[in-house]
Amino acid sequence: MNDRSVTRGVIETTLTELTLVSRQLSPECLSTDECLAYLRLGGLGRVGVVAAGVAVVLPVSFVYRDGFIEFRTSTGVKLQAVLTDSMLSFEIDHHDPSAGAGWSVLVFGVATATTDSAELAASTRAGLDPQAPGRRDYLIKLQPFTVTGRRFGHPDDLHRLHLGVL
């Protein structure tokens, strides 16, 4: 084997590695049905509001019931945003570092607040259990008008990358 063939082999290997590394896995858009399926899982999400001209994102326990994202709150920036008819954003996601995969769902909508005991009880029966300490006397019902989502590093893509198909 001469020096030229060794160099050529190293260059070819390096180019192949660079091609695989530089090829980004594009996020896959989720369908509305897939996004709603993730929302139906409930759990922990993040609500985004604008308070005094500053974007604020806060964690909330939530359920998705009857077409609404529901969470409980006390007085503060979330309630103030609802009472002033501000647009709210809401986001949930999941990331599995070992698989290099995850997803994200983003919702925009308007919300209403209620202290109705029947509504509060119904949300509790649906599984809403606020984890933050303190009283959460207001039920916020966010009605989505835009629901989008993305999945990245989908296991099929990772499998194809390992096989060298990508």
Image (tube, rainbow, N blue to C red):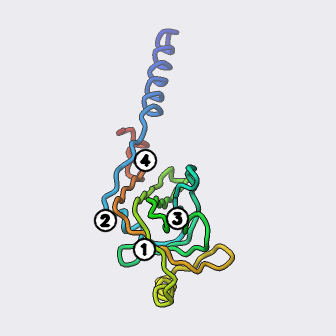
Q: Quadrant of the C terminus?
A: top left
- Amino acid bearing label 2: Asp
Task: Say if 140 sits above or below 108 in the image.
Answer: below
- Amino acid bearing label 1: Tyr
Task: Say if 93 sits above or below 113 in the image.
Answer: above
- The 10 Å Cα crowd at callout 4, few under 14, some 14 to 19, many 20 or more, is some
Measured Cα–Cα span from mark 1 to mark 2: 13 Å
Measured Cα–Cα span from mark 3 to mark 1: 11 Å
Read off the residue under disc 3. 45
Please name whichever residue, 127 or 72, is drawn nearer the observer in this view of the structure: 72
Q: Earlier in the sequence, mark 1 or mark 2?
A: 2
Name the residue located 55 percent from the left edge and 71 percent from the top edge.
Answer: 61
Read off the residue under disc 2. 33
Q: Earlier in the sequence, mark 3 or mark 1?
A: 3
Mark 1 lies on a secondary structure that is strand
- Residue 22, position as x, y percentages in the image: 45, 31
- Amino acid bearing label 3: Gly
Seen in the image, is 140 located left or right of residue 143? Answer: right
Name the residue located 52 percent from the left edge and 71 percent from the top edge.
Answer: 43
Name the residue located 53 percent from the left edge and 61 percent from the top edge.
Answer: 46
Read off the residue under disc 4. 158
Mark 4 lies on a secondary structure that is helix
Read off the residue under disc 1. 64
- Residue 21, position as x, y percentages in the image: 47, 33
- Amino acid bearing label 4: Leu
- The 10 Å Cα crowd at callout 3, few under 14, some 14 to 19, many 20 or more, is many
